[in-house]
Every structure is written in structure tokens, then in C-alpha cells.
Amino acid sequence: MNLITKALSAITGPLFGVIDKAVTDKDEANRLKNEIQSQLIDSESSIVKAQMQIILAEAAGESWAQRNWRPVLMLVIVAIIGNNYLIAPYLGAIFGVGMQLDLPERLWDLMTLGVGGYVAGRTVDKGIKTWQQGKVEQTVAQSNLYQQADVKRNP
């Protein structure tokens, strides 16, 4: 989620600054900001859903390799990291030998992305549900305010 939050902040921060300067009505500025955030969250939601559908399609595939290539790749990378940072140093300290395997930076990035992608997907999914619930509550609250204002105008 950290990466997604940073990306959204990079986009919305300057944009919201322009809205604050250009729109003098605070309510209208807040409405525009909420609409922009809503659109960004909706587009992020569709990206996460598309990624999830790809993973689900792979998991439901006919061949063992198709279903399991992502988990196997992650396990291989984790095994290399475990060897380099746990097994090899201890073998080296005890027996004077310990073979470390090269882990190219791209594989490290891939593992980070793989783990982060699953965590971010879950976080975004939960965040979207919370946001949608908040929008429903906000709509209900606004509806109640409008009804109260209407009652005061037309007793």
C-alpha cells in the first residue's frame, strides 16, 4: 500500500493545491477533491481487480506449472535469501565454508513486488470497501441534512 499511497499523493497533492487556488468556494473545492479521489480509487480498484483475475485464472489453470509458477518462484527467491543470510553465514562461522548464491537485483525487486502486490491488493480491497461504506454514510447524512433543511423551510 505504501507505493500506491505515494503514487496517489504525488498526483493529488499538486492537483489539490491548484484546486484550492482556483476555486474560491470551499465546499465546491472539497467536492472536486472528493470526486478526483473517487475516480482515482475507482481506477486503482479496476487495476487490482484485473490483476486478481489474472492470478485467479492462473490458479484455476489445467497444468500444475500454470497454477504454481508464482508461488514456486517466490519460494526459490526466499530460499536464496535464507541461504545467503542464515545458512551460509552460520556454515561459514562454524565450518569455514558457506556458499552464497547471487541474487540479481531484479529478482529481489520481483520478490518485493510479488509480496507487496499481494499485500497491497488486500489493503486496497479493504480500503475500497471502507471508502464505499463511508460514501454511503456521507450520502445518508447529506440526505438527512437536506430533509431537515426542507422541513425548516416548509413547516
Image (cartoon, grey):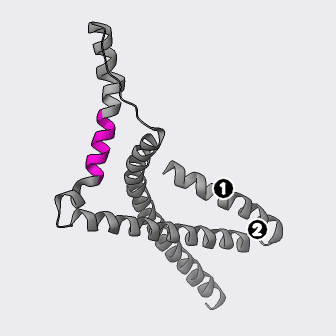
Tell me if mark 2 has few (under 14), some (14-19) or many (20+) residues whose alpha carbon lies within 10 angstroms of its own.
some
Judged left or right of residue 5, residue 126 is: left
Report the predominant secondary structure element of the magenta stretch: helix
Q: CA distance from mark 2 to mark 1?
A: 15 Å
Q: What residue sits 52% from the left and 67% below the top? A: 41
Judged left or right of residue 95, residue 48 is: right
Residue 10 circle label: 1
Judged left or right of residue 122, residue 91 is: left
Q: What residue sits 32% from the left and 37% below the top? A: 78
Tell me if mark 1 has few (under 14), some (14-19) or many (20+) residues whose alpha carbon lies within 10 angstroms of its own.
few
Q: Nearer the viewer, mark 2 or mark 1?
A: 1
| Kind of residue at disc 1 | Ala
Q: Which quadrant of the view contains residue 125? A: bottom left
Q: Check the image and name the residue furthest to the bottom.
A: 154
Residue 38 screen position, x and y as percent: 56, 70
Q: What residue sits 45% from the left and 71% below the top? A: 46
Q: Which residues are magenta?
A: 70-79
Tell which of 20 and 88 is nearer to you: 88
Residue 77 located within the stretch drawn in magenta: yes
Residue that badge 2 annotates: 19
Q: Earlier in the sequence, mark 2 or mark 1?
A: 1
Residue 95 screen position, x and y as percent: 26, 8
Residue 58 circle label: none
| Residue 122 versus residue 44 in the image, above or below | above
Q: What residue sits 28% from the left and 21% below the top? A: 87
Q: Secondary structure at mark 1?
A: helix
Residue 84 screen position, x and y as percent: 35, 25
Q: Quadrant of the C terminus?
A: bottom right
Q: Secondary structure at mark 2?
A: helix
| Residue 24 versus residue 123 in the image, above or below | below
Residue 76 located within the stretch drawn in magenta: yes
